[in-house]
Amino acid sequence: MDADIIDKLAGIEPGSALDMIRKRRPVAREQAQASYRALFAPENADEVSMTERFAVAVFVAGLHGGDAGIAAHYAAGLTISGASAELRAAIDGAIEAAKGQGPYGSYPAGPLSREDVAGPAHRVAAGTRQALGPRLAAVFDHVHLLVFHPRDAAPAALGALLDTGWSTTGIVTLSQIVAFLSFQIRVVAGLRALAGAN
Amino acid sequence: MPDTILEPPPHTAPAVFTRALLDWLPWLEPLAIDALTERHMKALIDAARAKSAYFRLLARDPDALRARTLTDKDIFYNPDAGLPRAERELAAAATSRFNGCIYCASVHSRFAATYSKREDDVQRLLDEGVAADLDERWNAIVAAAVALSTTPITFGSLHVERLRQAGLDDLAIADVIHAAAFFNWANRLMLSLGEPTST
């Protein structure tokens, strides 16, 4: 957990040009790492278990596609958390079924409606729901919304999480995990592109 | 009692992207002000944020909130070279415009307009969207923020080259990347845990 995760995922070597650039924003670098620690090595995992945290991360990374190294990193964490082979296979199936392109979604009715972009509200398939269990299946439905069409968010989406036993605090942590990974994955992709363009 | 969804009070939802001051109504119960411990206050960073329902809701995971906020501040406020503050805010506003976060776009378009003194260009970004023609340097920054915000991500070496042609050095380009990436974090929290209201 102590090695800088963005450096690892973006392949940034000590002394490289990108290392020097990251050193110019030392607090952002240190606190992006602290965010990762807070979410993936928390002091207290009562509301969201370690397996649930890494399951969500593998799903988010999979939906983003692209860099296989990021998905592999979180898949390793999932295995270490004690996830069964059955659960891991169910997550892989859920990713394949949920892939898409974002952002899309609707605005409140009015002048912005002309910018509405139609797209699916995804629901994890019945067989996969069973393998994931109701708590994680409900979360995956919500993760798809957050990743691909966050402007379609509505109170009912949170209600579906509360109905499967998630607490308000658990939903805050889950939302942070998805939102943080949306940041981390983009920083890694962006810095890789910057290094590659030299 | 099990946790429940909050019913927002009657309010006027903004119907367009705007630089006007908006408020935000949570869909889940924030921590009560008098329930905030020293750890929560440390997570809020600025004591004044205890007044914000958004930050008191995020304070339910104090370690994540604290690290999020410190990351945010260094990306946008670190004065050491790189991209001028106005253009870090432009990248934040463009990301929010593209993802559809009316609240985040209002805050960061105000900052972009204030620091750049280009109110008309910022307003065109809000009115016309991310295809608005601003000038080549701003168009390049907006296009980079958009390419970073798509899923899957479409940002690549052509965007880097265009930013360089527009005069950005690599530290400035890294600032564009971090500003846009950070708003993919912020937009998702703002959009999914509550809703904006006109004040």
Image (cartoon, rainbow, N blue to C red):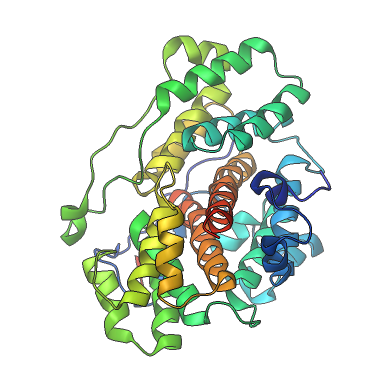
**Residue B37, image x, y percentages:** 78, 61
Q: Nearer the viewer, residue A108 or A25?
A: A25
Q: Nearer the viewer, residue B190 or B127?
A: B127
Decide if residue A22 is on the left or right side of residue B197. Answer: right
How many labels were placed on the picture?
Answer: 0
**Residue B6, image x, y percentages:** 47, 48
Relative to residue B49, is residue A154 depicted above or below? above
Decide if residue B10 is on the left or right side of residue A9. Answer: left
> Which residue extends farthest bottom?
B117
Q: Which corner quadrant of the image does residue B111 belong to?
A: bottom left
Q: Residue at x 56, y 52 (%)?
A: A183
Decide if residue A105 is on the left or right side of residue A153. Answer: left
Relative to residue B160, is residue A104 depicted above or below? above
Q: Residue at x 59, y 28 (%)?
A: A165
Q: Residue at x 29, y 71 (%)?
A: B125
Q: Nearer the viewer, residue B95 or A171?
A: B95
Residue B44 seen anywhere in this rendered image of the structure? no
Q: Residue at x 41, y 87 (%)?
A: B116
Q: Nearer the viewer, residue B140 or A142?
A: B140
**Residue A179, image x, y percentages:** 55, 48
Relative to residue A142, is residue B21 depicted above or below? below
In the picture, the quarter occupied by the N terminus of chain A is top right
